[in-house]
Image (cartoon, rainbow, N blue to C red):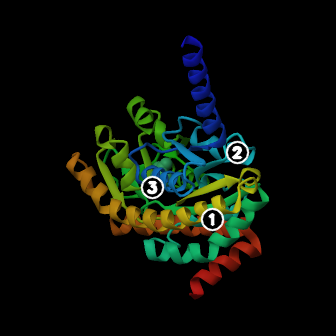
Amino acid sequence: MKTLTGLMAATALTAVSATAAMADKWDMPLAYSATNFHSENAAEFATCVTEATGGSTEIVTHPSGSLFAGNDIKRAIQTGQAPIGERLISAHQNENPLFGIDSIPFLASSFDAHEKLWEVAGPKIAEVLAEQNLVYLYSVPWPPQGLYFKKPVESVADMEGIKFRSYSTATARMAELTGMLPVQVEAAELSQALATGVAESFISSGATGYDRKVWEHLTHFYEVDAWLPRNIIFANKDAWDGLDDATRTAMTDCAAEAKTRGLQASKDYTQFTLDGLKAGGMEVGRAGDSLVGELMVIGDTMTKEWLDSAGDEGAAIVDAYKMQ
Ligand code: PCA
């Protein structure tokens, strides 16, 4: 009996490890908290792929920068340390100016305008990513970007010397041009940066302010609609090439669903989170006309700088967008 039980247990173990070996587990690093709409959308994408492949490819999301910090996710996927992940592409404008196309101030300030810009720019950016060993799967915009402060701000002069949390090349440049002091901080570290005084202001969506409960530290959110930055979900090309056709189709189909679902979630989350900031005690409203006018002048400078750096290719995208 003993021998038979032992034999059965051994057989069961072999069966379990064989199944585990057959399932291809894809870790998916995410920079934002599990409850953020991008992360929830990625979790649904992961489930979609896992189900569509009957579990032969299992995608496991790791939110809040728990596997790789936001700034390290892109490189991790390029080098195959992770097979798939999500990254705010404008944070990599230093690698290629096209990655900053979604952060040209006031070029595309609404969801509709941003989607039109992306129709033109998305395929070009996918090409640049392909040259970096990355396969573009889907992408989703953040809600429009506004300014957070801990005092009323009516002019650029009111911003002088404020410590400003940046998340990209454009946000750091905006800080410089408004006389603020930029410090790059991941969204996952934002609450701590505000609590310790490392930062006392930033530009972002209502979504991120809401996710990070910034009413505990700040008092004002000014809707500016400066731009809508985008998160891109990409896979390592070698990992992608190693998949069979059916699995690739499952991923592409699930990505198409995630793109549509994510855009809707971003739209829905916009007003919901602005209301949430208000409920937390913040003053939320549109920036005054004179402040907007001053920001437009700064935006013109940034637009010119971007066009200078992006050359003919960049100008062609902006022109094609404007002609639509
Ligand atoms: N939230 C992200 C990027 C843009 C946004 O709305 C952040 O603040 O890090």
Residue occupying image coordinates x 51% and y 74%? 115
- Answer whether residue 154 is visible to the viewer in this image: no
Q: Quadrant of residue 18?
A: top right
Q: Quadrant of the C terminus?
A: bottom right
Q: CA distance from mark 2 to mark 1?
A: 25 Å
Q: Is mark 3 within 8 Å of ligand 1?
A: no
Q: Residue furthest top?
A: 2
Residue at the disc numbered 3: 41
Q: CA distance from mark 3 to mark 1?
A: 19 Å
Give the mark, 2 or 3, whose residue is nearer the N terminus: 3
Relative to residue 290, is residue 52 drawn left or right? right
Q: Position of residue 306 (x, y in %)?
A: 66, 66
Residue at the disc numbered 2: 75
Q: Examine the rendered structure and indicate whether residue 166 appears above or below residue 105.
A: above
Q: Nearer the viewer, mark 2 or mark 3?
A: 3
Q: CA distance from mark 2 to mark 3?
A: 22 Å
Which is more toward the observer, 179 or 77?
A: 77
Residue occupying image coordinates x 38% and y 46%? 35
Which is more toward the observer, 145 or 299?
A: 145
Q: Position of residue 166 (x, y in %)?
A: 53, 47
Q: Tell me if mark 1 has few (under 14), some (14-19) or many (20+) residues whose alpha carbon lies within 10 angstroms of its own.
A: some
Count of marks placed on residues: 3
Which three-letter amino acid code belongs to the residue tagged 2? Arg
Residue 249 marker: 1
Q: Tell me if mark 2 has few (under 14), some (14-19) or many (20+) residues whose alpha carbon lies within 10 angstroms of its own.
A: some
Mark 1, secondary structure of its residue: helix
Mark 3, secondary structure of its residue: helix
Q: Position of residue 288 (x, y in %)?
A: 33, 65
Residue occupying image coordinates x 64% and y 56%? 234
- Answer whether residue 60 is visible to the viewer in this image: yes
Q: Is mark 2 within 8 Å of ligand 1?
A: no
Which three-letter amino acid code belongs to the residue tagged 1? Thr
